Image: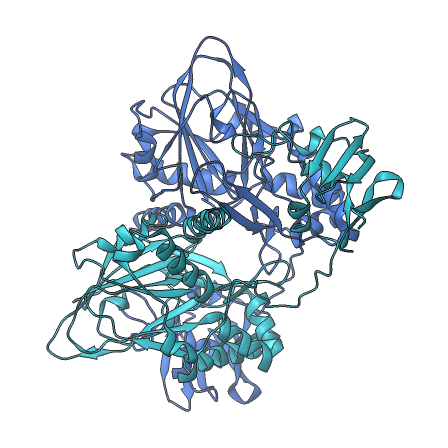
Chain colours: A blue, B cyan
């Protein structure tokens, strides 16, 4: 069997690689030089690139290239004569010579949208397990990545213990609400969260930029009537809107909204971000939705405002559709975490003679996803040993 | 003199207000109802909205509207009969019936781009002043908002005191580098920042999402030859690129880049965000640029990759143009803060027998801008009293 071959294209400005299994991909000389993995290009110790784009000649071409026995690609560049080798799997995982068109609102494969079908399969972990067993922590974090929320049981009901949960995978994001905050009915509340009112499904703190990307809510006491927690997948709401009304989806994505919070002295938080945030390639990356802190919308053309409001209303109707919601009532020692850029959470109103005492804190996804990726790598390595 | 008048449009779906000075603006009935300021709509205590979009009839129209003596607008809605009044200045500051087209890469008026012309007007504050005088703190924070960086003198040279500076206006963002971190030459560094190498102008941690939006670097010791700090306005670099090469600007804005950091055990940080980030309305909102952690770019079509790299190179050439840089050498007790979504910072290489000991920490702009807005409001109120 042939080990494959490389065709030099365009006087060496690019090359077309054909691997033994028939897969082909073109790469530019400048891309290959920039991404070389050898210790003159990347620090062997920490993997960081040692050169800048200005260290690479703009005239860089591929002088010679060949496929090794193992599918690796050996390249010699001109004019600097630099030689480097790319492992086959490394290069094949980074092919950009492919169809990149994906339409608006697409999601990567590690994310699964959900509706009330998840009611009987709520992702749950146990604090005792996740803090002691890396595989249990990995699985719990992977649920958060896939579904945007998860429940945790067996959490100590001591005040502030939700911060210990956050520190299993990342770091608490302190805000004007403190390192963590009490969620219970108060007289003269600075925030409607601190009442017994029901709260429409929402993301937290959209008036903050950057928004806290994770929220944890833990239960210390819950003997009231009502007060159930609900979660709704904002990515599913956005997708239903897109299918029903592509223009409405585009208006909510392409016109910034505004959010404000000025409920306490010395605090004047404001942001300008759309309800539906897309990356420049159309990837659905965030939802911001909160009736309490939505400020006047002033970045929508007059002629589009009626349709914008119709889309806003329809978004709210979809998120209040019971078919979209997963509901649970937290007991003391239970906590849930939400991806606050995706999953909206709600609370039913409550009354009665008991008490409802929750604590909340914020954290960020960078730490969670980093810890998860490192745990997955360890698992893969152990499986291979 | 006439006090102005209101014309009901489109069977009450909108109204055109004409104020006494001739200014006119149209508003939709649904927008006015949603943004009513009365205590049935907004909490008088904390300003949060008490209703959701679903509490407003989709058939909402303006039954009657009039202009008061003071220019305020009184509106009666149908079908619910709700009545509310908008102060003239509140409504005039939120007119959306206007030309919203601004082109790609525009900036709001509170931001001023700069180049080496700022070398002799570096914004500087004194820690003793900013921690004691609200007006000094306001002015220092306003410099950060306008220029994206500022220097602070008279900072105690005790370890960790930079966190006290961050807490004057916001909150430290803890990361895998700690609550704060040491920046000095190390053996076996986990990050090239911890060497005596020069570092190309960069934003920090672009492999993190959300990126830390502020960085503070304080100096405890600096007796080496070299090691100067430089700052470059990334918004100015982007603007020069846009003027020279609109297609290159669009490629860097419209194609995501990738960033990675895996320099320490248990850490696998990855992000996918463009070098130049625009809001959906074309506002320039962030720059991410770091040669050390730039990962292979795989979201650019093959046919655009050569032009993408040419734009990337040109961006780097502009940022290394001495006309773009402001340079200073920190002395012990001096600190600088940068808006890490805008201003790139660099370090010249250093050598010699002395020591260079800096400490760094991250914080976020939400807190800074909130504190600034509150200070500005207080100042305005005091000026009016």
In percent of width and height, residue B153 lies at 26, 64
The quadrant holding residue B361 is: bottom left
**Residue ranking furthest to the bottom:** A79
Above or below B235: residue A56: below
> From this viewpoint, which residue is outermost toward the right?
B11
Extreme residue in the left direction: B353
Single out the residue that lies furthest toward the front: B1
- Residue at (46%, 38%) from the top-left corner? A143
Q: Position of residue A162 (x, y in %)?
A: 34, 32
Q: Residue at x 57, y 70 (%)?
A: A97
Say if residue A51 shows up in the picture: no
In the rendered image, residue B222, in percent from the top left (x then y), is placed at 17, 71
Lateral position of residue B115 relative to residue B188, left or right? right
In front here: A260 or A334? A260
Asked if B217 appears above or below B368 in the picture, the reply is below
Q: Is residue A45 visible?
A: yes
**Which is more toward the observer, A137 or B209?**
B209
B93 displayed left or right of A231 = right
Q: Quadrant of residue A314?
A: top right
Return the x and y of residue A264 as percentages of the image width and height: 45, 36
- Give the residue at x 67% y 29%: A321
User: So how many labels did they put on this image?
Assistant: 0
């Amino acid at each position: 069997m042939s080990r494959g071959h490389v065709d030099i294209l365009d006087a060496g400005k690019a090359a077309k690689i054909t691997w033994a299994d028939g897969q082909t991909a073109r790469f530019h000389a400048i891309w290959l030089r920039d991404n070389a993995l050898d210790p003159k290009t990347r620090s062997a110790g920490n993997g960081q690139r040692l050169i800048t784009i200005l260290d690479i000649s703009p005239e860089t071409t591929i002088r010679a290239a060949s496929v090794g026995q193992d599918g690796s690609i050996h390249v010699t560049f001109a004019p600097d004569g630099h030689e480097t080798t790319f492992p086959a799997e490394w290069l094949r995982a980074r092919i950009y010579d492919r169809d990149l068109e994906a339409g608006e609102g697409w999601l990567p494969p590690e994310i699964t949208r959900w509706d009330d079908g998840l009611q009987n399969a709520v992702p749950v972990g146990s604090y005792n397990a996740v803090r002691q067993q890396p595989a249990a922590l990995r699985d719990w974090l992977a649920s958060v990545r896939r579904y945007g929320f998860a429940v945790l049981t067996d959490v100590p009901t001591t005040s502030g213990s939700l911060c210990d949960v956050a520190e299993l995978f990342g770091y608490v994001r302190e805000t004007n609400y403190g390192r963590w905050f009490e969620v219970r009915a108060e007289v003269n509340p600075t925030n409607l969260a601190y009442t017994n009112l029901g709260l429409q499904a929402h993301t937290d703190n959209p008036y903050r930029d950057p928004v806290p990307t994770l929220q944890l809510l833990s239960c210390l006491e819950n003997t009231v009537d009502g007060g159930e927690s609900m979660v709704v997948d904002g990515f599913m709401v956005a997708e239903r809107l897109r299918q029903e009304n592509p223009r409405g989806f585009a208006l909510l994505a392409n016109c910034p909204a505004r959010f404000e919070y000025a409920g306490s002295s010395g605090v004047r938080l404001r942001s300008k971000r759309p309800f539906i945030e897309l990356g420049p390639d159309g990837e659905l990356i965030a939802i911001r939705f909160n009736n309490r802190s939505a400020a006047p919308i002033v970045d929508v053309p007059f002629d589009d405002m009626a349709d914008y409001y119709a889309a806003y209303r329809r978004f709210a109707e979809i998120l209040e559709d019971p078919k979209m919601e997963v509901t649970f009532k937290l007991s003391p020692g239970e906590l849930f975490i939400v991806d606050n850029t995706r999953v909206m959470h709600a609370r039913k109103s409550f009354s009665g003679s008991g008490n409802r005492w929750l604590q909340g804190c914020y954290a960020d996804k960078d730490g969670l996803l980093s810890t998860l990726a490192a745990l997955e790598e360890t698992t893969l390595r152990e499986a291979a040993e």
